[in-house]
Image: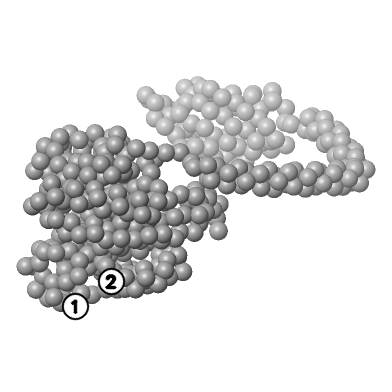
């Protein structure tokens, strides 16, 4: 386990209770989870019927009563509550924006949202998921829900003294459940979530919702239609089908389109060994319970899909700091790091002593080498002194050059070192100068040091020659 993985694991450790509430078309499902360090257990579950949306007052009263009874009967701590709603109550839109918009994406969406959703900004709550679309564009999946629907749920829960910290979708709650059971929050997966009248096809990758399409029941004629829809969304999101496991769930008994849906439908079996629960949970036939459990997992900090349709100002501590348990664990980790760091310092001190002893042992040899090096330097200086008089006499060379160089030429540079002469200057014909120097007995191997260049009626030259001793 890497340090980052250990840090992430410690961050999730806690002693907290979480309440997940899924409000369906005709029922409410509640799940109470308890987390102790890394262990998560199902403490209680319940489903209660609700009047349909066409009876708002009766529906609201039934929701309040069901939540209040569940909390009272189970002594549930509702300070960490996440509300889950059906996908049919939300509107989605996929937008491509310039990559530069990422820096101020929230402000860009606030400005453009009325052009993307057929409701005013004041009438909706929204959240979004992003991913890069090439190097120059950003793909944004915009998720919106009418404020009126959310406020009705919040008012009903408020009467039961429950204030949710987040609002998620049924598909993202189920994805949190699957990711928790698989132990892989960053893996890709596809979901087929059936509800009365429609089926959602959702794709998740890297822990984010990247696609969600709601297909009305009348468009689901056979299995091939669903498979084509899934394949099309995979192609649009550039996900390899063989690397995306497919899971399915029906949110209400008989909610499917009457065909054999592809994918794994036994999601409760995934929880064995990961979620502590009674056999009643694993044998449950109440499909609305799964999104409630997924929402409760989010409440106890085990959610991985970052979706929350509740506005930031109404989240009531959703992103509060570390809990006391986490602080204690971090303190213990810090203590372990101090012990480890202390042992490292002791080892470093021992190594330094060993190195010092070794240096003292080789010090006489080092001194001898330095003495020999000093002797070598002295001899090299004596040789240089003896060679100083070996250079050719400059005066005869200058006289010879004066006789060989024509009157219309002149020198701008003269360098004599180690028997090698370099002269720079200008002449009407630099090649004639090469010929003249080559005929002299004082010079040999006369050549141009660099190509000549024309400057007016003269040629700029650089000639090199060896001086004959």
The answer to whether residue 150 is seen in the rendering is no
Which residue carries the number 2 mark? Answer: 285
Left or right side of 328 for 127 = left
Outermost residue on the left side: it is 218
Q: Residues within 10 Å of mark 2 (few under 14, many from 20)?
A: few
Of the image marks 1 and 2, the number of the one nearer the N terminus: 1
> Percent position (x, y) of residue 333?
61, 47
The residue at the point 34 percent across, 47 percent down is 81
Left or right side of 88 for 343 = right
Q: Residues within 10 Å of mark 1 (few under 14, many from 20)?
A: few
Q: Assess whether mark 2 and mark 1 are in contact (beta carbons under 8 angstroms).
A: no
The residue at the point 18 percent across, 47 percent down is 60
Toward which corner of the image does residue 348 lie, by quadrant?
top right
The residue at the point 77 percent across, 48 percent down is 347
Q: Which mark is residue 409?
A: none
Q: Secondary structure at mark 1?
A: loop
Q: Secondary structure at mark 2?
A: loop
The answer to whether residue 450 is seen in the rendering is yes
Which residue carries the number 1 mark? Answer: 260
Q: Nearer the viewer, residue 50 or 139?
A: 50
């Amino acid at each position: 386990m890497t340090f980052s993985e250990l840090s992430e694991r410690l961050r999730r450790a806690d002693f907290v209770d979480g309440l997940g509430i899924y409000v369906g078309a005709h029922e409410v499902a509640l799940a109470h989870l308890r987390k102790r360090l890394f262990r998560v257990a199902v403490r209680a579950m319940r489903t209660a019927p609700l009047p349909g949306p066409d009876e708002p007052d009766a529906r609201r009263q039934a929701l309040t009563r069901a939540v209040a009874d569940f909390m009272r009967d189970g002594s549930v701590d509702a300070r960490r509550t996440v509300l889950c709603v059906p996908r049919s109550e939300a509107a989605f839109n996929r937008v491509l924006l310039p990559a530069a918009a990422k820096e101020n994406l929230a402000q860009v969406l606030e400005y453009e949202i009325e052009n993307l959703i057929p409701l005013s900004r004041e009438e909706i709550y929204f959240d979004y998921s992003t991913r890069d679309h090439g190097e120059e564009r950003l793909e944004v999946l915009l998720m919106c829900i009418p404020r009126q629907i959310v406020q009705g749920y919040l008012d009903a829960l408020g009467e039961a003294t429950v204030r949710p910290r987040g609002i998620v979708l049924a598909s993202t709650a189920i994805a949190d459940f699957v990711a928790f059971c698989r132990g892989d929050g960053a893996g890709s997966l596809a979901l087929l979530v059936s509800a009365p009248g429609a089926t959602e096809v959702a794709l998740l990758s890297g822990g984010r919702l990247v696609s969600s399409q709601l297909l009305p029941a009348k468009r689901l004629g056979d299995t091939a239609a669903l498979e084509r829809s899934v394949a099309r969304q995979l192609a649009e999101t550039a996900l390899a089908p063989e690397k995306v496991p497919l899971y399915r769930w029906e949110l209400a008994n008989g909610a499917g389109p009457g065909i054999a849906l592809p994918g794994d439908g036994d999601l409760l079996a995934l929880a064995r060994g990961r979620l502590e629960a009674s056999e009643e949970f694993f044998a449950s036939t109440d499909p609305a319970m799964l999104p409630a459990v997924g929402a409760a997992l989010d409440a106890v900090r085990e959610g991985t899909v970052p979706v929350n349709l509740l506005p930031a100002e109404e989240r009531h501590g959703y992103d509060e700091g570390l809990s006391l348990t986490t602080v204690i664990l971090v303190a213990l980790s810090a203590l372990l790091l101090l012990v480890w760091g202390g042992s490292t310092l002791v080892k470093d001190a021992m190594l330094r002593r060993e190195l010092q002893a070794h240096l003292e042992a080789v010090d006489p040899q080092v001194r001898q080498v330095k003495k020999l090096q000093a002797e070598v330097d002295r001899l090299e200086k004596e040789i240089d002194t003896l060679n100083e008089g070996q250079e050719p006499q400059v005066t005869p060379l200058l006289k010879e050059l004066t006789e060989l160089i024509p009157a219309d030429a002149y020198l701008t540079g003269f360098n004599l070192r180690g028997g090698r002469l370099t002269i720079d200057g200008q002449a009407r014909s630099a090649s004639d100068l090469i010929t003249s120097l080559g005929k002299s007995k004082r010079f040999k191997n006369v050549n141009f040091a660099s190509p000549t260049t024309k400057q007016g009626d003269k040629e700029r030259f650089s000639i090199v020659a060896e001086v004959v001793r």
